[in-house]
Image: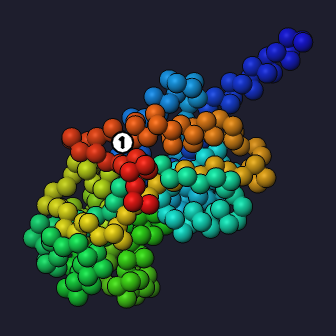
Amino acid sequence: MTLAAVIAINASSAAEQSIVLASTTSVEASGLLANILPQFTAKTGITVNVVAQGTGKAIDTARRGDADLLLVHDPEAEQQFMDEGHGSTRRQISWNDFVIVGPSADPAQVKGGSDSVAALKSIAATQAPFVSRGDKSGTNAAELRLWKIAGRTPDQLNREKWYRDIGGGMGQALNAASAMDAYTLTDRGTWLSFNNKGSLIVVIEGDPRLLNRYDVIELSPQKHADSKLAAAKVFADWLVSPEGQKAIGEYQMNGQKLFNPSSASPK
């Protein structure tokens, strides 16, 4: 074998040692990825470069071929991605839940309940400020599904002065809610790691409709042949392996677990 061929093979091997993960913002903002990725890289030598976006944008990034792997949390959008033939394998890696947070003064008088839809109806009836991410993220999609059950469409909501669509990430939405003494829907992981709570407290939790599932999706070689699918599969397999599941389950913030391994999921 010529020296040029050896160099080419080594260069190809080195290139395979890094992948781009299009990820939902919550697993990034909560600190989960920063905690578990060094463990994976130390074991495999593969570096994972994270592009953290709302789930809708992350899926679009993968759809364009600008990522090698997806980690997101919007079941309906994920199914569409799979139905379009962009994904080859979809597996759950973890779950937590959404909560509704709001000012401790609780103008809508919903504090302590577990019915998220009834809470939204009360917020609307009292016209208490509500912050929406409005960014096509998994959290935004979950919020709009709940509003739909409560009898409100996006067009109706956007005409209301009390409904504030900020078009931003979870941290931005929580900062806005804190500044405005408003209600908002957040994933528990980001909430527990958020340091600017102000008067905000959890007012609604424990509703089965607030289950928040995270899935890793490998890309289809038919549509994404240029992606680093082999290295991406190594990471996807690690996330669902006993070692990866242990790393996810052991991650805590201020003594509280932020994500549950998929093996403990109610599915």
Residue 51 located left or right of residue 174: right
Residue 17 in the image: x percent, y percent? 63, 28
According to the picture, the residue beneath numbered tag 1 turns out to be 249
Residue 236 in the image: x percent, y percent? 57, 42
Residue 182 located left or right of residue 71: left
> Which residue is rendered at x = 46% and y = 33% of the image?
243
> Which residue is rendered at x = 24% and y = 66% of the image?
205
Quadrant housing the C terminus: bottom left
For this rendering, which residue is in front, 67 or 94? Answer: 94
Q: Quadrant of residue 124?
A: bottom left
Tell me the crowding category of disc 1: few under 14, some 14 to 19, or many 20 or more residues within 10 angstroms, Cα based. Answer: many
Residue 253 located left or right of residue 151: left
**Image color mode:** rainbow
Disc 1 marks which amino acid? Gly
Q: Quadrant of residue 237?
A: top right
Reply above or below: 124 against 8. below
Q: Disc 1 on helix, strand or loop?
A: helix
Q: Quadrant of residue 177?
A: bottom left
> Which residue is rendered at x = 51% and y = 65% of the image?
75
